[in-house]
Amino acid sequence: MLTDAAKALLHQDLARVAAQGEAFADGVFDAWFAGAADAERLFQTHSFSTKREMIDATLIAVHDLVDGASWLRWDLAAFGARHAGTYEVRDEMYGAYVDAVLASLRGVFAGELGAEREAAWRDALSRIVGAMQRWHHLDEVAEVLARPG
Ligand code: HEM
């Protein structure tokens, strides 16, 4: 489970990030595609509204993880199954996405992110993408989310 301190930081940050809207979303995809041509290729035939949907889903997953929402495991299992099965996403592509979200957060917070907040975000995002990759083992999905912080 995330620590209470991490939950409090993420709770504060989520409102601020959501208020940035497009700037945050653009920052993620700019940082991601600058270094991940394999991921960019998978999006080439898709519209930006789907990319924005992905950013919103990522922020909602962080929010649900902070809140301990019981349905998060099912959402992430479904996302993971669709990503692996329909979009041909490979497990090793998830790390670069987490790095890109962090890069965009640094931009949005303009030097105020700091090591503690960054660690809280990395912890939450790593759990979320780790759980997505266990979509074929639902018992492991729940275990990844609840691991001691
Ligand atoms: C926190 C991690 C992620 C979350 C929560 C997430 C969530 C989503 C959501 C909600 C969609 C919209 C369509 C749907 O519901 O299936 C989507 C689309 C997509 N995602 Fe992700 N995603 C994540 C990471 C990734 C990664 C690492 C890749 C690697 C390339 C990826 C590739 C795609 C592609 C290609 C689409 C477009 C599908 C289409 O338009 O047909 N996603 N994602």
Image (cartoon, helix red, strand yellow):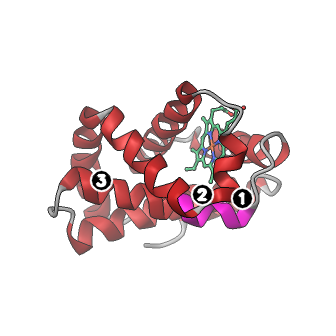
Depth check, front residue: 24 or 77: 24
Q: Is mark 2 within 8 Å of ligand 1?
A: yes
Depth check, front residue: 138 or 32: 32
Image coords of residue 98 (percent x, y)? 50, 60
Residue on which the image places disc 3: 10
Q: Secondary structure at mark 2?
A: helix
Q: Is residue 1 visible?
A: no
In the displayed structure, would residue 106 be above or below residue 119?
A: above
Residue on which the image places disc 1: 133
Image coords of residue 57 (percent x, y)? 51, 37
What residue lies at 29% left-to-right and 44% top-to-bottom?
14
- Please count the marks in the image: 3
Residue 2 magenta = no
- Indicate the quadrant containing the C terminus: top left, top right, bottom left or bottom right: bottom left
What's drawn in magenta, residue-wise?
91-97
The numbered dot on residue 129 is 2
